[in-house]
């Protein structure tokens, strides 16, 4: 059985308003994911989850051409930004608070992973509608937001894999890859297939067939056997159904219902496993009615509330 403890840590919201990992859809226009932190804060997120302000890691200027040295968009900027975000996160850990990072695109994972590595052996619960296992060879758009999982597991250009004291930042054996509905074929290459084969994988259909509590129990048991007692949650909001979360970079049909994500969050937050978490990819510019942004804050608020009252 999954451990059930009452979530009692102080949450510190950390802004990571970065679109550095995305490619521009409209020429000359920076993708709007960087607007997510301000958009969620304007909905009183901090008050609603009783969080403190953990500050902001401001990204360098967004460039519209692919970094010629790294072969990834904003490659060198991302390397320096990841170090800055990691420093901010380490301050939150030192204060014994629970960081909730508001991205930004999925490449903010590099900063989180770097900070976690400095705090011991951690697992990664990677919840995403995609696998983010693209490489400079397989990615047509050359955006790190499609490569982030490969990068933190050590596959990719050295400028973005060799950020810390040890490579990789996460051992793929310590990764739970959950909720994908894009399929393995989207991520060619023997190197990333090897990574995936080491991971605990449960895509959207398995999540539903087995039930998320069972899936999580198996995944956390695997990590427990390896001596991994703490971990990080990466939550790309594109894991949600396109009908309720169309305000994302890479849309695809289907996905989780809001209550399914909320149940998952409640179980995981109540398990005591998490050292912190991040929310990524919501783009307020693609949410003219504001309904998708409202939904995010509702789900997060309900999940923390339930985890705080779990007995
Ligand atoms: Mn993603």
Image (tube, helix red, strand yellow):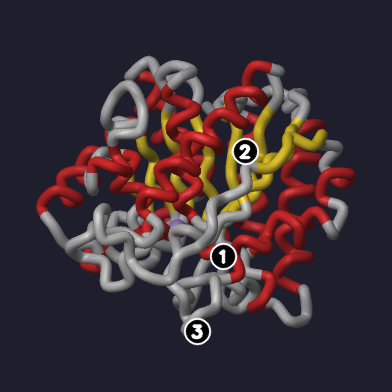
Of the residues tagged 1 and 3, which is closer to the observer?
3
Of pointers 1 and 3, the one earlier in the residue sequence: 3
The relative height of residue 172 versus residue 103 in the rendered view (above or below) is above
SS for dot 2:
helix
Residue under label 3, please give it: 26
SS for dot 3:
loop
Count all numbered tags in the image, as a single digit: 3
- Towards the viewer: 173 or 214: 173
**What's the distance in space between the residues labelled 1 and 2, CA to CA?**
17 Å
The relative height of residue 251 versus residue 217 in the rendered view (above or below) is below
**What's the distance in space between the residues labelled 3 and 2, CA to CA?**
39 Å
Which residue lies at the image location 78% right of the left edge and 48% below the top edge? 302
Of the residues tagged 1 and 2, which is closer to the observer?
1
Which residue lies at the image location 67% right of the left edge and 51% below the top edge? 262
Which residue lies at the image location 73% right of the left edge and 45% below the top edge? 303
Q: Is residue 216 visible to the viewer in this orientation of the structure?
A: no
Of the residues tagged 3 and 2, which is closer to the observer?
3
Q: Position of residue 208 (x, y in %)?
A: 47, 58
Which class describes the residues within 10 Å of circle 1: few (<14), some (14-19), or many (20+)? many
Q: Position of residue 9 (x, y in %)?
A: 74, 24
- Towards the viewer: 306 or 78: 78
Q: Is residue 121 visible to the viewer in this orientation of the structure?
A: yes
Residue under label 1, please give it: 240
Q: Are marks 3 and 2 in contact (CB under 8 Å)?
A: no
| Left-right relation of 46 to 1 | right
Residue under label 2, please give it: 267
Which class describes the residues within 10 Å of circle 3: few (<14), some (14-19), or many (20+)? few
SS for dot 1:
loop
């Amino acid at each position: 059985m999954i451990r059930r403890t009452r979530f009692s840590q102080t949450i510190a919201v950390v802004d990571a308003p970065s679109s550095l990992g995305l490619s521009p859809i409209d020429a000359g226009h920076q993708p709007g994911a960087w607007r997510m932190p301000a958009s969620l804060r304007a909905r009183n997120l901090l008050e609603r989850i009783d969080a403190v302000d953990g500050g902001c890691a401001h990204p360098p200027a967004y460039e519209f051409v692919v970094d010629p040295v790294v072969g990834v968009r904003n490659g060198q900027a991302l390397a320096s930004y990841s170090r800055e975000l990691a420093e901010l996160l380490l301050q939150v850990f030192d204060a014994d608070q629970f960081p909730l990072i508001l991205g930004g695109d999925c490449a903010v994972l590099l900063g989180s992973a770097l900070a976690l590595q400095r705090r011991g052996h951690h697992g990664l619960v990677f919840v995403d509608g995609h696998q983010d296992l693209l490489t400079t060879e397989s990615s047509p758009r050359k955006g790190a937001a499609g490569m982030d999982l490969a990068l933190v597991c050590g596959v990719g250009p050295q400028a973005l894999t060799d950020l810390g004291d040890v490579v990789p930042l996460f051992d793929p054996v310590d990764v739970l890859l959950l909720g994908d509905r894009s399929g393995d074929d989207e991520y060619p290459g023997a190197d990333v297939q090897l990574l995936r084969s080491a991971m605990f994988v449960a895509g959207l259909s398995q999540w539903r067939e087995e039930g998320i509590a069972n899936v999580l129990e198996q995944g956390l048991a695997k990590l427990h056997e390896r001596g991994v007692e703490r971990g990080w949650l990466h939550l790309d909001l594109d894991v949600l159904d396109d009908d309720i979360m169309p305000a994302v970079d890479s849309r695809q049909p289907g996905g989780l219902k809001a209550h399914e994500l909320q149940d998952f969050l409640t179980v995981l937050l109540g398990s005591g496993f998490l050292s912190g978490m991040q929310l990524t990819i919501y783009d307020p510019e693609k949410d003219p009615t504001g309904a998708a942004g409202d939904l995010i804050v509702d789900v997060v608020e309900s999940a923390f509330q339930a985890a705080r009252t779990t007995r």
